[in-house]
Amino acid sequence: MGHNDNIAGRPTEGRPPAVLQVIPSLVSGGVERGTVDLAAALVGAGWTAYVASAGGPMEHYLTRSGAHHVTLPLASKNPLIMRRNVAALIEIIRRHRIDVVHARSRAPAWSAWSAARATRRRFVTTFHNAYDTDLPLKRWYNSVMARGERVIAISEFVGEHAASVYGVGPDRLRVIPRGVDLASFGPNRVSGERVAALATSWRVPEDARVVMLPGRLTRWKGGLDFIEAIARIGRRDLCCLLVGAEQRAGFRHELEITIERNGLGGVFRIVDGCNDMPAAYMLADVVVSASTDPEGFGRIIVEAQAMGRPVVATDHGGARETIVPGVTGWLAAPSDPAALAAAIAEALALDDAARSAFAQRAMAHVAAGYTRETMCARTIDVYEELLFPEPGTAKAEAGSPLTVVA
């Protein structure tokens, strides 16, 4: 054990606590955004923040906040690379006097768990979804996310999965919903020029009602159901946007064929992602999340509500927590284009007064429970539970004996 090992599990007197978050990469996505946001909040609170990952474009935002990045091949599932990652993380933990190791994804979590055990550091995990458990090996692989001394779930839906499938008890489980940056996501934060630039780029007719489904172009995001729902509505004054990069070759072509088969070639646009989502939401009259499988949280749903947009989502997963049906949005049965069509039609039928009332309720709903500041503050509270326990409380024990995944 190295000379910097913190046997008591507490920071050394006279220095700020240090947290190491471990994720596969910093390319894009909600997990990455949450990691960067939390690192910035830690720095703002006087802590020291490190992130270990394979790197990516979001490193810039991380280092700009005053946090530190360490590049490791943590996206790899190769057993030899994972074993080397353990050794590298042990060295990082000792050199930088890390107090809390926080794993946010399964492959790097195995290495992080072993390194935290070897150095006797506090270990925290975040469940970002209800992982598939059909195969015994898959269930075992996922189980590392349940080995934290504290296990954070991003919704009650995910928390129930962690509790029921992996036996995470209330002593360790903490539900902390993801948060939106209201400094970016708010109607008064977006200029008309930004919205107009997107409308021009995406060839949106001036007099069209815009219905948008943001999300990666994968089958489970429900793009095919969305196309069929729009076909059922039968309106030609709509401009429907599928906004997201293709994940698997060929699916975009399938979407295009389905659009043409339904005679909607002039109605739909498929857009390869967007770097200005606040402006994209402002362009939309209705935002749709049509996922066929439950979302662990559903960031799009909350972002759109923060922008005051009417939201239609499928009735499962995190959407049941983030939408108040009939008050801030609509829920439709999953994989049911007729139900989706009915909800979208109802949202489009709002008059100006009803639409304004929906917007105010939706924005207040997000501000009350789904802000970036709340998410970060509650996560820091979890770290403090472990590092500064109340007198007389027993310290939580980490999972099972140290093993390196092979």
Image (spheres, rainbow, N blue to C red):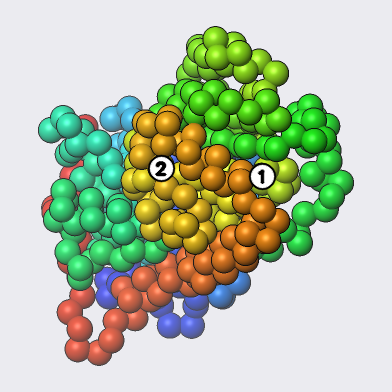
Q: Amino acid at mark 1?
A: Asp
State left or right for residue 185 relative to residue 226: right
In-front residue for pair 15/244: 244
Q: Amino acid at mark 2?
A: Ala
- Looking at the image, can residue 263 be seen? yes
State left or right for residue 170 relative to residue 285: left
- Looking at the image, can residue 371 be seen? no
In-front residue for pair 5/307: 307
Figure disc tally? 2
With respect to residue 190, does 335 lie above or below? above
Marks 1 and 2, how far apart in space?
18 Å
| Quadrant into which the N terminus falls | bottom left
Q: Residue at x 45, y 63 (%)?
A: 19
Q: Residues within 10 Å of mark 1 (few under 14, many from 20)?
A: many
Residue 393, image quadrant = bottom left
Question: Residue 253 in the image: x percent, y percent?
Answer: 55, 11
Q: Residue at x 38, y 70 (%)?
A: 383
Along the polypeptide, which appears first: circle 1 or circle 2?
Answer: 1
Q: Residues within 10 Å of mark 2 (few under 14, many from 20)?
A: many
Residue 245, image quadrant = top right
- What residue would you read off at disc 1? 285
- What residue would you read off at disc 2? 332
